[in-house]
Amino acid sequence: YIVEIPFQSSPSAARDMMAAVVDNGFVDNIATRFITVEYITYTPFVNYFTAHKFFVEVAPGGAWLAEGVVKNFRVWTSNMKATTIYDFHFLAFVIYYCVMFIREWYREYQGSRSLLKFIFDAWNFIELINLLSFVIVFAYRFVWWGYSVAKSDAARMPPTYQNYPTALDD
């Protein structure tokens, strides 16, 4: 069985619905095996969404095992243009250092005819790991921008819709 509290419900109405669920025996110590509570909150002054997912499972021996997952995320909006400009400025430096790293590596290869000698130097290895982590972070950032732009209508605050935007659950 599923009990869903509508998106437009007030907090007091939601509490009343949950009290009715418990009072009517929907949740008990005998037949209940799994309970999940999920909701998303929005904090406007920092432009953060927080997805809360709490699970309670009753093990075969009768133990109640509780687990929770809380994830904070932002949706890119046009208000974040200054941050985006800064990100692209930083990306330009990362690309510059990647090019310089490859040039040094090529110069070392021309002198020693060994591709691995340059990488096995401890500082060069650390620099490679650092550059790779920057590139991976920027790749994630571009994916985040893509998702945010695709879902920007659903994340607009204050909302213009009457039902919960299920597109934000992806």
Image (tube, rainbow, N blue to C red):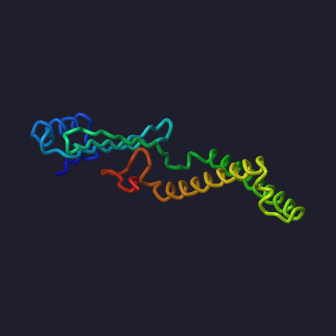
What residue is drawn where x is 30% and y is 39%? 66
* Snapshot quadrant of residue 8: top left
Left or right side of 146 for 25: left
Picture coordinates of residue 60, whole percent (x, y): 20, 45
Q: Position of residue 55 (x, y in %)?
A: 29, 43
Tell me: residue 44, above or below residue 7: above
Q: Locate residue 106 relative to residue 135 in the image: left or right.
A: right
Position of residue 61 measured from the top left corner of the image (x, y, whole percent): 20, 42
Residue 31 in the image: x percent, y percent? Answer: 13, 45
Which residue is pictured at 37% across the width and 43% down the height? 40
The quadrant holding residue 30 is top left
Q: Nearer the viewer, residue 126 or 140?
A: 126
Q: Residue at x 74, y 56 (%)?
A: 95
In the rendered structure, the answer to whether residue 5 lies left or right of residue 31 reads right
139 relative to 26, above or below: below
Q: Residue furthest left?
A: 24
Rendered-image quadrant of the C terminus: bottom left
Residue extending farthest to the right is 111
Residue shown at 80% from the left, 58% from the top? 117
